[in-house]
Amino acid sequence: MKKHKKLFIPSGDVARTAYVNHLIDMAPGTSDTFSGQTFNRTLANPGPGFPNYPDAVFAKNGTSTSIDLGAGLYSYLFAKYDGPNAGSEVWYVGSLSGVITIPGFGLAGQNYGLSGWTLFGPGGGNAPDGGATAALLGLGLVGLAGLRAKFGRN
C-alpha cells in the first residue's frame, strides 16, 4: 500500500497577502517560485499596469461565488481552489464595483471547487473603464496566477 504525503500549503491571511504581493511584483509573462509555491503571471496588465500596482492590504474573506465589491473598495481578489489539490487565481478588480461572480471551479482544465476567497485593498485607482475591466475579468485578468504547488506522490 502506498502512502500519500500530504503537503501543508499555508493559506491564512498573512500567507495570502504575501502571495498576492509577490505576484503583483512579477513582470507580466513570467514564472517563478516563492514560499514553496509556483507562480505563473499572465501577460495581462490591466489597471495601473506593471510595475505600478499598489501593495495588497488584507480586507476580508468569504466562501461564496458571489462577491460584493462595494463601490470600488478593493484592488485584488484571491480565490483558492480545493485545499492542497489545486491552486489559486488572482484577479485585479480595482475599478469594479457591485456584485461579481467568480468560478465555482477553477484552474483551467481542473475540476477543483472553490475553497474560499480573499479581497485586498486599497481599491480604485487608474484602471480601465468598467466595461474593459469587466471583460478582462471574464478572460482571467491578471489572474490565472497558478500559485500552484508541485506535489510529490509517494
Image (cartoon, rainbow, N blue to C red):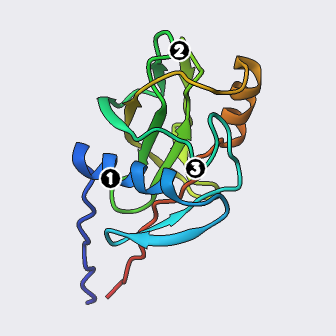
Query: Which circle marks residue 51 in the picture?
Result: 3
Height in image: 25 above or below 38?
above
Q: What is the C-alpha distance between the residues marked 3 and 2?
A: 28 Å
Q: Which residue is mark 2?
A: 99
For the residue pair 104 and 57, the one nearer the viewer reads as 57
Q: Is residue 75 left or right of residue 132?
A: left
The image shows residue 140 at horizontal and vertical percentages of 66, 43
Q: Residues within 10 Å of mark 2 (few under 14, many from 20)?
A: few
Of the numbered discs 3 and 2, the one sitting upstream in the chain is 3
Amino acid type indicated by mark 2: Val
Q: Is residue 147 left or right of 91 when viewed as pictured?
A: left
Crowding near the residue tagged with mark 1, few <14, some 14–19, many ≥20 C-alpha atoms within 10 Å: some
User: x%, y% of residue 120?
Assistant: 38, 32
* Residue identified by numbered label 1: 18
| Position of 22 relative to 7 (above/below) | above
Mark 1: amino acid: Ala
Residue 65: % across, % down? 47, 28
User: Viewer-proximal residue, 151 or 28?
Assistant: 28
Real-space Cα distance between discs 3 and 1?
17 Å
Res 27 → quadrant: bottom right
